[in-house]
Image: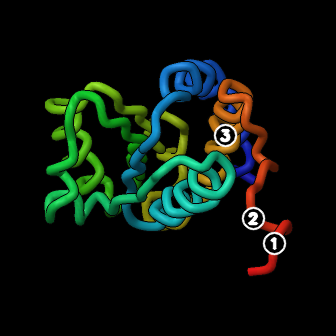
Amino acid sequence: MRIDRIVKQARQHVEKRALIFAKNYKDDSVIYTMASGAGYGAAYMQSICIFMEMQWINYASIHSGEYFHGPFEITDAEIPFITQVSVGSTRPLDERALSFLNRYAKRVEVLDAKDLGLSTIDSSVVDHFNHSLFNNVYPVYNQAFAAEREHPLKTRRYMWKVEY
């Protein structure tokens, strides 16, 4: 299947970047992810399941289309962002937000679906594959991040330990 090949190549493409990201962001107490369209689900999952649940970092996912409705005010040179740039109908939203970040932020990790090979999928259906790509690229970052922080992804304070 074409998406499987794209994901495999994308994971290989980000391996070195993920290690650099882990070193540069390991001590941050807050990180934001920005995304749109079908890819937003991957940003949301990264936010609540990895950074909050597994790494205990304050984290929020911001929809690129909502960024200029208030969240852009938290942008500065020191605030870290992971920005997903989708391929398809919501790409202009992501590009607009990334353009602003490139002017006012200094700590931005960009995951561009086009650079990761997703643009080879037919434009009439490509929107539906953004989530699959991003959701399968994040684990490369997550493993590097957990190792660099010496905080395994399985570490929990409450989950499976106390009644809730």
Q: Which residue is mark 2?
A: 158
Front residue (pair 56, 146) = 56
Front residue (pair 100, 50) = 50
Q: Residue furthest front?
A: 162
Is residue 156 in view?
yes
> In this rendering, is residue 142 above or below 46?
above
Q: Give the residue drawn at x 78%, y 39%.
A: 152
Q: Is residue 130 left or right of residue 148?
A: left
Provide the secondary structure element on which disc 1 rests. loop
Q: CA distance from mark 1 to mark 3?
A: 25 Å
Q: Are marks 2 and 3 in contact (CB under 8 Å)?
A: no
Q: Give the residue drawn at x 47%, y 51%.
A: 58
- Mark sitting on residue 162: 1
Q: Amino acid at mark 3?
A: Asn
Provide the secondary structure element on which disc 3 rests. helix
Q: How is the image coloured?
A: rainbow
> In this rendering, is residue 88 above or below 75?
below
Q: Give the residue drawn at x 31%, y 36%.
A: 79
- Mark sitting on residue 142: 3
Q: Amino acid at mark 2?
A: Tyr
Q: Position of residue 89 (x, y in %)?
A: 33, 63
Q: Position of residue 31 (x, y in %)?
A: 43, 43
Front residue (pair 98, 52) = 52
Provide the secondary structure element on which disc 2 rests. loop
Q: Amino acid at mark 1?
A: Val
> In this rendering, is residue 57 above or below 47?
above
Is residue 114 in view?
no
Q: Earlier in the sequence, mark 2 or mark 3?
A: 3
Q: Around disc 1, counting alpha carbons within 10 Å, would you say few (fewer than 14), some (14 to 19), or many (20 or more)?
A: few
Q: Quadrant of the N terminus?
A: bottom right
Q: CA distance from mark 2 to mark 3?
A: 20 Å
